[in-house]
């Protein structure tokens, strides 16, 4: 079996990377406090069936989708990676440590990363700046694990110091052209957002006041989202609400497109996203596909205006450029509340969650979640949906 290449994040922002390199391993936590040595099936789906309940016990209130993602990452590290596979681990300083999996799973309790694999680390450290833009984008994917095997030749050239390869991807057979509706992407994207604890809702422009003309497309976001700050200790959350109430919730705005094909189209969509998201803490332009050659302009726009960019890549949504946080614009929120009933309901439900007495918070959150977009409950459901809607996912 050919070896694979995987980007592994060792703690948030690579905080444990140096320790792992010094001690010769990679590891994960995911709140699973048990030795998995006797329960690592060859099939990750079976592993998820057995492990998701344990994860949900440690993370009450989280979705089954988020549990599936976490357990899938854990299986990849514990079982999916094979001896001889190559791992690239961000150091947190703009470089990647490079190593080879050298042993099977083992468990070290009462440590930050108890689920471990032995790794033989190379002396070579790869600078992120030396990577092609496509490899940078892939290694920047959200999540603990990211399969980057398609960039095998480029990675090997970076390890050996060869400069002959500028950007190499394994050529894939072209897929036949498929047609899908832009709005059919909403459930796919909202399911991804839920794995990041962001609850999202589609804003139907057609439900706005009859006084609204076509120019109002530069006012409405396609999707709105909210992320509540979660603390397991109620006293911590109460203190945060009392001292920094604005930090208990973050609001997001998303402009979703099927494809960005040109520099002109990029600017058009970007400034539409900028206009539609000035009310929120974070604004994003989201595209299922982005044509090559637009990286420099995307970076310039992001640096100048702060709207982030997200792209579907390697079967997952990837933040190419993060959004800059800004204060809420209550005048625009008021305008949108008056224009669109869906938006007003979304804001009203958030307010009720934030203002609910402690014993009614769960009830308020359940009521809020009921008006959000439905998400996939399983990979099988997602696969069926994509097939039915001709989405090449």
Image: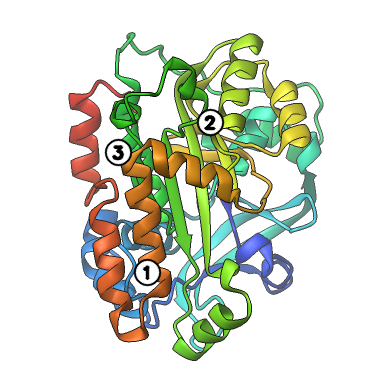
* Residue 178 x %, y %: 30, 12
For label 2, the SS is: helix
Q: Quadrant of residue 138?
A: top right
Q: Residues within 10 Å of mark 3 (few under 14, many from 20)?
A: some
Q: Which residue is tagged 2?
A: 150
* Residue at 24% in and 63% down: 367
Instruction: Mark 3 or mark 2: name the one nearer the start of the chain.
Output: 2
Q: Residue under circle 1?
A: 353
Query: Is 275 positioned to the left or the right of 372 in the image?
Result: right
For label 1, the crowd category at 10 Å Cα-Cα, with few meaning under 14, some 14 to 19 and many 20 or more, is many
Front disc: 2 or 1: 1
The image quadrant of residue 267 is top right
Asked which secondary structure carries label 3, the reply is helix
What residue is rendered at 33% in x and 30% in y?
Answer: 209
Looking at the image, is mark 3 or mark 1 nearer the viewer? 1
- Residue underneath mark 3: 187
N-term mark: 3 or 1: 3
- The single residue placed furthest to the front in the displayed view is 211
Q: Crowding near pointer 2: few (<14 within 10 Å), some, many (20+)?
A: some
Distance from the alpha carbon under mark 2 to that under mark 1:
44 Å
Vertical arrangement, residue 101 with respect to residue 7, above or below: below
Image position of 12 with respect to 4: above or below: below
Query: Can residue 166 be seen by looking at this rendering?
Result: no
Marks 3 and 1, how far apart in space?
Answer: 24 Å
Q: Is residue 55 left or right of residue 95?
A: left
Picture residue at 39% right of the left edge, 77% below the top: 32
Please indicate, yes or no, whether residue 25 appears anywhere in the rendered image: yes
Viewer-proximal residue among 327 and 9 = 327
- Front one among 300 and 47: 300
Is residue 283 shown left or right of residue 122? left
Among numbered discs 2 and 1, the one appearing first in the sequence = 2
Q: Nearer the viewer, mark 3 or mark 2?
A: 3
């Amino acid at each position: 079996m050919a070896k694979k290449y995987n980007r592994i994040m060792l703690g948030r922002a690579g905080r444990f990377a140096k320790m792992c390199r010094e001690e010769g391993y990679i590891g994960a936590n995911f709140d699973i406090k048990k030795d998995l040595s006797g329960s690592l099936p060859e099939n990750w789906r079976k592993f998820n069936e057995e492990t998701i309940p344990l994860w949900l016990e440690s993370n009450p209130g989280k979705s089954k989708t988020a549990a599936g993602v976490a357990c899938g990452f854990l299986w990849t590290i514990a079982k999916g990676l094979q001896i001889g596979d190559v791992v690239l681990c961000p150091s947190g300083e703009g470089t990647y440590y490079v190593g080879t999996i050298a042993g099977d799973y083992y468990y070290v309790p009462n440590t930050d990363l108890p689920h471990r694999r032995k790794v033989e680390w190379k002396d070579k450290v790869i600078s992120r700046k030396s990577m092609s833009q496509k490899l940078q984008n892939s290694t920047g994917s959200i999540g603990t694990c990211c399969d980057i095997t398609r960039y095998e030749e480029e990675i090997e050239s970076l390890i050996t110091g060869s400069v002959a390869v500028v950007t190499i991807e394994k050529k894939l057979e072209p897929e036949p052209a498929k047609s899908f509706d832009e709005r059919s992407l909403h459930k796919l994207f909202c399911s991804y957002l839920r794995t990041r604890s962001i609850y999202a809702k589609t804003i139907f422009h057609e439900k706005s006041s009859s006084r609204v003309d076509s120019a109002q497309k530069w006012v409405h976001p396609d999707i709105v989202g909210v992320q509540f700050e979660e603390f397991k200790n109620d006293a911590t959350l109460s203190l945060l609400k009392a001292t920094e109430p604005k930090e208990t919730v973050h609001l997001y705005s998303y402009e979703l497109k099927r494809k960005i094909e040109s520099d002109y189209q990029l600017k058009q969509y970007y400034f539409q996203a900028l206009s539609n998201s000035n009310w929120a803490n974070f604004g994003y332009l989201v595209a299922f596909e982005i044509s090559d050659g637009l990286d420099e302009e995307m970076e310039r726009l992001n640096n100048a205006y702060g709207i982030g960019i997200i792209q579907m890549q390697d079967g997952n949504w990837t933040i190419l450029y993060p959004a800059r946080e800004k204060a809420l614009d209550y005048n625009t929120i008021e305008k949108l509340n008056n224009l669109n009933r869906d938006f007003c309901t979304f804001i009203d439900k958030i307010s009720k969650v934030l203002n609910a007495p402690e014993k009614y918070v769960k009830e308020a959150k359940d009521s809020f979640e009921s008006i959000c977009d439905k998400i996939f409950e399983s990979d099988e459901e997602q696969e069926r949906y994509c097939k039915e809607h001709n989405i090449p996912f």
